Image (cartoon, helix red, strand yellow):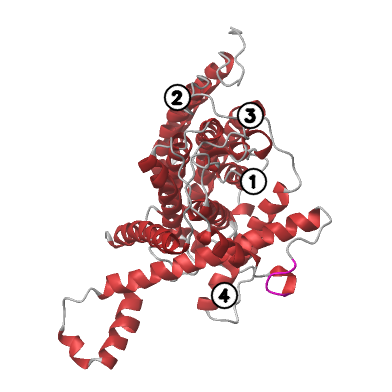
Amino acid sequence: MFDGYYNAFWFLLIGIAFVLVNLFVSSLIRPSAPDPVKLTPYECGEESEGTGFVRFNPRFYIVALVFLIFDIETVFIFPWAVVLKGAGAHVLIHMMIFLTILAVGLVYTWGKGDLDWIRQPTQW
Amino acid sequence: MVQWLADNVFKMMAEFILPFLASWTWIPWYTIALLHVAGVMIGVISVLAMFLIWLERKVSAHIQNRLGPMRVGGWHGWAQSIADGIKLLLKEDIIPAMADRPLFILAPVIIFTASFMSFVVLPFSQYIVVADLNIGILYVYGISTITVIGIIVAGWASNNKWSMLGAMRSAAQLVSYEIPVGLSLLAGIMMAGSLSTVDISLQQGGGIWNWFIWRCFPFSFIAAILLYIGALAETNRTPFDLAEAESELVSGYHTEYSGFRFSLFFLAEYANMVVASALVVILFLGGFTGIVPVSFVPDVIAGPFWFLLKTLLLVFVMIWIRWTLPRLRVDQLMTTCWKYLIPLSLVNLGIIGLWVSISG
């Protein structure tokens, strides 16, 4: 039963091995001439100010939060979708109730302005 | 397929050469066969990626009324990608002094391995599939998401503002478009009642009119289009290539990468294009089944032929779109996904669910 996952596991190992072997082969034939200027970050020729670990827009967190809700929803729908064919009306109705709740959630987020990249003040 | 290869090719060949091997029961024939299959798959991915890079350059050139690569190798510069690959292998490998070294090294490995592992479940024919997992589609959906981690790690580890911005944008974009992709995948899964890629393809056998794209017309068609749009975003292709918007972010999360590490990002991008197109083909365009019910050539040849033909056609459309449409702004990107694609795919899912429930 787990044969397929055994294959996938070996593909993981082979993928990593492919990268390592190629990096090793490349390290034998490529030049190496380090230079302090060469090792600075490339920011269009300007000398870089501070580190690259800058603060970023909190919008990304909101996107990640909304994504989590919807992605978990998708995971819940997957097993339902597999058994739906020929399962009868009640299976469909249950999922429709679930989807309606989610759609209400989407509309709420939308109304709150959290789906806009530049957030407008709450409209209602 | 691997079991068959192990029993009928490797074991028999070895016993033919060295007869006493037959009594050695501890030799892991299955794993030996699997290693060869994995090696062949790496070859297939490399050749496909090199061909697609060449194709992209030629197509873009002809769209812009140029000729593109013409010199290397003779006929229309067919060896250009090979030359570029060797060049990248010979280039100096620069790791910036301020970079987060272990993560910097790890990122291309994650990205390449994730796209490589997706190839496990791609069915080239009914039997030519590395592993026909019973959760095939869910597996691809999950494994291809690991790319996001690789991109964030690459952007963070580079210690470069362009990389960081590119990685954050890319992550936001990839996770957003994951949802319409998932909801559209479900349309095909509901119609097939299975997650196995081989099973889904087989159910569409018997000609072009049996493909899922025509079922429940036009809603299945809409699901296929949504899935394709999502696939464009998931592979960071124009019009969704904000992650590497070269006019503003140099080249996004792989700005600091050079040499072979850089080529891994490229390899993974083209491999992902193939996987994304292959998903559309498996779920809606019949997978490895032909456009007519009769077949005059054995399945071993016809299956890979149809599968690769359909997949590469979709990849060609991706290239075509890239060189035709301009890039979206970041707010337009989010609006497109959250306000158009997700409501549309939710409604579409409900309608197809109703149709499957009634007709099935």
Query: Quick check: is B72 in the magenta stretch?
Result: yes
**Circle 3 residues within 10 Å: few <14, some 14–19, many ≥20:** some
Q: What residue is disc 4 on? A: B302
Of badges 1 and 2, the one in the foreground is 2
Asked if the residue under mark 2 is in contact with the one under mark 1, i.e. CB atoms within 8 Å, the reply is: no
Check if mark 2 and mark 3 are on a common chain: no
Label 3 or label 1, whichever lies nearer to me, is 3
Residue for point 62% across, 53% down: B213
Q: Where is residue B307 in the image (x, y as percent from the top left)?
A: 57, 65
Can the viewer see residue A95 in this picture? Answer: yes
Q: Which amino acid does label 3 sit on?
A: Val
In front: label 4 or label 2: 2
Q: What stretch is highlighted in magenta?
A: B70-74
Label 1 element class: helix
Q: Do the residues labelled 3 and 1 touch (CB within 8 Å)?
A: no
CA–CA distance in space, label 3 to label 4 = 43 Å
| Residue that numbered label 2 is attached to | A65
x%, y% of residue A37? 52, 39
Residue A84 in view = no
Viewer-nearest of discs 2 and 3: 3
Main secondary structure type of the part rendered in magenta: loop
CA separation in Å, label 1 and label 2: 26 Å
Q: Which amino acid does label 1 sit on?
A: Ile
Q: Which chain carries label 3?
A: B
Whichever of callouts 3 and 4 sits on the residue coming sooner in the sequence is 4
Tag 4: amino acid: Ala
Label 1 CA crowd tier, 10 Å (few <14, some 14–19, many 20+): some
A83 part of magenta stretch: no
